[in-house]
Amino acid sequence: MELNTLKKLRFIVPGILLFIQFVLFFSIKDLNDITNYLELHNVKNEISQFLFFISIIFIGILYYTFDIRKKIFKRNFEYVENNIKNKLLKPYENKYSTDEINNFKKGSKLINIFFYLIDNDASLKEKAKIVNFNGLIWTSLMDLLIISFFGFIIFFIRCFVIPVIFHFISYFDYSMAMAIANFVITFISAFFVSFLTEKHVSLGNEQLEIIHQIHKKELDRRISDLL
């Protein structure tokens, strides 16, 4: 998968997921309404198509602007990045001092070297397509986890909090079903995010192995240039 395609999909996917969540909360009162909603907003309806597209773009912009995914899953991203840094520097632990090694790890210097070497090797670029595809599934499941947890909260509030405070029951059966569905999706997504985080590390290790085998001299030079 090309990097530009990956970036576009990472922008669009959360927009679609959030749009669906808003529709389920604000536009549908029971499970039968889902079919009616789909019939009313048939893809042949050009106005619905246009509004759907604009809504997704707007929601995607908000999600991207606040960088929600990266803030919530900061530890996952750092885990992957730290693995790359540590594995790149593994052969140099006896060559450089601890202070020098720690200095190399600061910022994105090593990550830049890693991607430079990938971009200049045909076999690594092919492997990068697999990594990018895994990354898309990985981040999409992060988005699904975030948005389904958000859905669980809002439907739970509509089930139990609103009736207590305002003495008003708001489509209890439907809201309960959606709360349970969102909770289950959150739980399943969390499992797969954890699994794909490890897979992303494993795929990165395959690239690092090639770098150490084939591009050792180039890596030596570029790391020494960091001093």
Image (cartoon, rainbow, N blue to C red):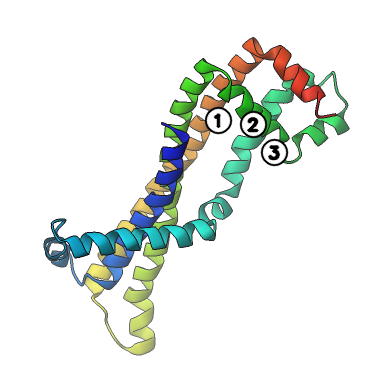
Query: In this rendering, does residue 144 appear at all?
Result: no
Total marks drawn? Answer: 3
For this rendering, which residue is in front, 96 or 220?
220
User: How far is disc 1 from disc 3 in space, using C-alphas?
Assistant: 17 Å
Q: Nearer the viewer, mark 2 or mark 3?
A: 3
| Location of residue 119 (image quadrant) | top right
Residue 172's place in the image compared with 89, above or below, is: below
Near-viewer residue (172 or 206): 206
Residue at 75% across / 23% down in the picture?
A: 222
Counting residues from the N terminus, which is met first, the one under dot 1 or under dot 2? 2
Does residue 224 appear in this view? yes
Q: Residues within 10 Å of mark 1 (few under 14, many from 20)?
A: some
* C-alpha span from label 2 to label 3: 13 Å
- Amino acid bearing label 3: Ser
Q: Which is more foreground, mark 1 or mark 3?
A: 3
Residue 108 badge: 3
Examine the rendered structure and indicate whether residue 79 appears above or below residue 44. above
Q: Say if mark 1 contacts mark 2, CB within 8 Å.
A: yes
On the rendered structure, is 96 left or right of 164? right
Label 2 sits on residue: 83
Say which residue label 1 marks.
201
**Which three-letter amino acid code belongs to the residue tagged 2?**
Asn
Give the camera-side residue of 188 and 122.
122
